[in-house]
Image (cartoon, rainbow, N blue to C red):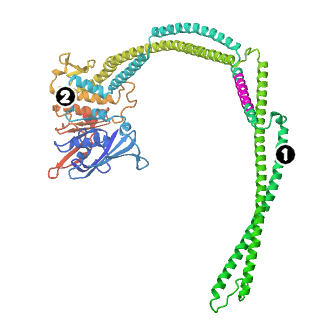
Amino acid sequence: MQITKLVFKNFMGYKQLELPKTNEEFPEGLVLISGQNSYGKSTILEGVLFAFFGPKIFSGRNASSFITYGESKAEVTIYFNLDNKKYNIYRKWGRTGGTFTKLFEWVKNAYREIKNFNIENFFEISTEQALSTVFVRQGEVEELANKKGADLREMIIDLFRLNIIDDALSHLDHELKNVKYNKTKLEEKRVPIERIEEDISKIVRENIELEKQIVEDKEKKGKYIDRLSLLPSHDLIKKLEELNEQQKISEEKFHSHQNYFKTKIKNTSLSIKDFEPIGNIIEQINSLEKEKSKIISEKELVDKQREATSRGLGTTRGRIEDAESKKKKMVKNFSSKMNDTNIAICPTCQNELTKEHYDEMVLKFNNDIKVNQEKIKTITKRLDMLSAEVDKNQNKLDTIRDRILIMQGLKGDYENYQKYELKLSKDNEELNTFLVKNKAKFPDPSPDKVKQLSIEREKLTTELEAIEKAFKDKQERFDKNEDELVNLKDEITRMKELDKSIGELEIEIDHINKAKEFVRRFVTEYMVVKRLVKNIALTTNKYIKDFTSGQYSDLLLDLSGTRKTGLSLKIRDNFIGVHESIEVLSGGDKTALGMALRLAISELMSKIRPIKDSPKKNPKIDILLLDEPLAALDATRRERILKHLIKSKTFSQIFLITHTDIPSDINTHKIFVRKDHSTGISTANFKRETKAINSLLNP
């Protein structure tokens, strides 16, 4: 990987920065960044990290803290080459809201945006690994040199992703917990086989007793069925009871109607012979009906004559009244008019009424009255005679009607009597037919005996039903027990399988515990002691002898300690020929050792795969960003380290910040940082070293 250009706008102290300018690019190799303290050297490295990984890489700081004072937003763009391709990453953010990020690839003379990218996947390195390998913070080398064994051990484990073993152990713990949980659940379901066998024995004993009782109930049931088979069936008994009851009712009704008829006929002039056959009485009734019709006709004729006579009587009486009225009026009129000159008028003919005429008229009225009075006597006598004849006919008619009514009533009673006699005969015949047909079943068909048979059959039937119910209940209980025996035997099989499963889980628990122990031993004995530590030591040794002018070499690391005891470091002092603890080293030697160890770790991160689950591809970022790593070193050690970095082929680019004087024989690319104290704005310019570096390194 090679960073070719960086562009800042309103990024911390840089208002506008473009390095290098115009068409120039950063070369590979070592680039020194120099300038006084607080001028903005570290800001350049922070800008690179910010562009690649965003503000989350700087814990405790938010994106707005990277914006130049007084500005509302900032932009950072880093151009770089990777795998023979050109890219640039662009980030823009404001004091409020999130960071706007885009990644571009150079395709056919133009940058094209890469959609939906993940920067950690793109570089194949996590943010945490980048901070611990790519970027060396100010003071980190001294801190690493003085780091305690436990802290150093944890740092190496985290850097090389050995914490995946902790994840594995956590996974095994989780699996162990699940297996123990499953084992507990199975144990909760477990029933001792001995107890199941006791239940089986109990049910077997119960079924033996039930089987015995079932046989007894079956025999008893057969006896009851045999006894019932000797008795008439329930339907036959019921039928005979119905026939007896029907015959009894018919007999009672027959005698009742017969006695009623005989009682009624005693009060008449009739006898039973008059009804035998019934046509005799019908003939007499018909004769009386004819006579009744004749009398009715005669009576109607006399009634008409009486009505006509009665009307004639009324007419005659009206004539008498009319004559008397006229006579009275005429007398009154004539008497009142004789005393004056007025002429009296006849009320009948309206002529002048004279005395002779008056007398003549009075006589005439008297004669008419007398004649009509005689007629009234004759009519009245005739009317009395007709009324007597009407009454006589009415009496005859009433007598005949009464006789007809009596005879019709007796006829109905006789017919009822005959009907019930016929019904009784029919019922007797039906009863006799039934008894003949079922003589063997009913040797004594009397109602009392039949009633006893019914009671006996009902009693036997009830007792048989009780026996059958008890038999059924016992049979169902027996069958249920048989099913339960099958279930219990199956349960024994299940419990054996359950015991087997519990045993398998116990074996699995033992295997997991052994696996945990194996993982711990594997980390300690193989991954750490035999492989990782060896590689760290060998890689560090490449640097330490050169950094310490040949005094120290052959670093030994012992990482087999616990988290508490940590990492133990010893180094060979070539002047005295023995390995000593790094605690006896001087401050400068410790810093040189820390620098060597730090470079070794960064170098190994791009090569070694501690375990199978480590990244299959090496991280694509093979640059170093070193922030003041040489401040605590003397000039000799600084010069040796710088020369080593210049000729190093391990890293494609190294950006190293220093505020100390650079030895005159160190020729490399440089970035010079300046600051305007009146505005607080920083500026920087890049100077490429054109002199052949190799000739300087190999004088």
Q: Residue at point 22% right, 39% down?
A: 657
Q: Can you see residue 699?
A: no
- Residue at image mark 1: 287
What's the CA distance linking mark 2 and mark 1? 165 Å
Q: Residue at x 51, y 13 (%)?
A: 488
Q: Position of residue 61 (x, y in %)?
A: 23, 41
Query: Main SS type for the magenta part?
Result: helix
Which quarter of the rendered picture does the N terminus lie within? top left
Residue 136 place in picture, x, y as percent: 24, 34
Total marks shown come to: 2
Q: In the picture, residue 297 is in which quadrant?
A: bottom right
Kind of element beneath mark 2: helix
Q: What's the magenta region?
A: 240-258
Pointer 1 local density, CA inside 10 Å: few below 14, some 14–19, many at least 20: few
Q: Are marks 2 and 1 in contact (CB under 8 Å)?
A: no
Q: Quick one: quadrant of the C terminus?
A: top left
Q: Residues within 10 Å of mark 2 (few under 14, many from 20)?
A: many
Near-viewer residue (162 or 81): 162
Based on the displayed image, in which of its 4 quarters is residue 444 positioned? top right
Instruction: Name the quadrant containing residue 138.
Output: top left
Residue 485 tag number? none
Q: Which residue is mark 2?
A: 591
Where 600 sits versus 180, above or below?
Answer: below
Q: Position of residue 680 (x, y in %)?
A: 17, 50
Q: Nearer the viewer, residue 574 or 355?
A: 355
Q: Is residue 46 left or right of residue 621?
A: left
Q: Amino acid at mark 1?
A: Ser
354 in the magenta segment? no
